[in-house]
Amino acid sequence: MHFPFYIFGIHPHLLFESLSYFIGFRVYLYTRNQERIPMDKALWVIVGATLGAAFGSKLLYLLEDPKRTFDNLHHFVYLIEGKTIVGGLLGGLFGVELAKKCIGWTRSTGDDFVLPLTVGMMIGRIGCFLTGLSDHTYGVETMWLTGIDFGDGIKRHPTQLYEMVFLGVLAFSNYLVKKSKVGWEGLQFQLFMSGYLLFRLLIDFIKPTPHPYLGFNNIQLASLIGIGYYVWLIMKKHTAKRRGIHA
């Protein structure tokens, strides 16, 4: 297999990233709980999520290597290229909350995004894997059986495939939570975010990216902040529910 692996002459990253957005949006429209939020307000939430994700994804990418970013502040191409999923998720969260505040919506909307996000991210990671070395999403050199040679004679951790498997497990776990009808509105999204951020915190230790922040990289720092927030939020919701039951 040669990387990048073009499909009908189309670059895999472009093809699968486009498919991830298109299919993810269609999944959202098909599976969303129409009783939770009307479509006109849901569209504003989507706009907030899209703009927030674009900003957060770019900002966190620029923090990957602060010195390199500072040295390239005058290079327009460098400033517009690159993005990160974690930055997109956290930025999208901020954008959604801002949009909800603007339209006066107070109910949780996150659960509707769990399956679309999972499907979209898994499709996108196929493109990352087929792109190979130029995508910079692979892992460090390994002797594991799972090691993949992306074209330079060195076997590396296919972290893109690891992530796809993890997302599948996470989606199944959320399905069980949904089917059991336990918890509260928003719990599925909170579990999805905290689970994925924990995965990224750990998996990035086997990625050959700069770790300039006391042994952590930009993704890991953002993940730690996100994990802290969601642990606090889940504990807060759990305590509130217990008090309600006792009352």
Image: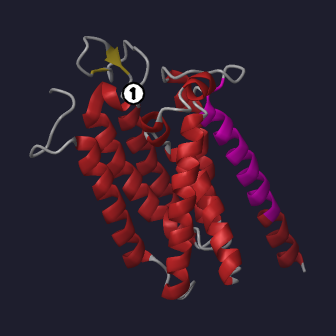
Quarter of the picture containing the C terminus is bottom right
| Image quadrant in which you'd find residue 182 | bottom right
- Name the amino acid, label 1: Tyr
- The kind of secondary structure the magenta stretch mainly shows is helix
Q: Residues within 10 Å of mark 1 (few under 14, many from 20)?
A: many
Q: Report the side of 36 relative to 39 (left or right).
A: right
Q: Position of residue 112 (x, y in %)?
A: 51, 71
Give the residues in magenta: 216-236
Say above or below: 241 vs 149: below
Query: Which residue is at 42% across, 37% downward?
Result: 77
Query: Quick one: 166 or 123, which is closer to the camera?
Result: 123
| Image quadrant in which you'd find residue 12 | top left
Residue 222 magenta: yes
Say above or below: 5 vs 190: above
Q: Position of residue 194 (x, y in %)?
A: 63, 50
Q: Please give the residue where the numbered disc 1 appears in the rendered image.
A: 138
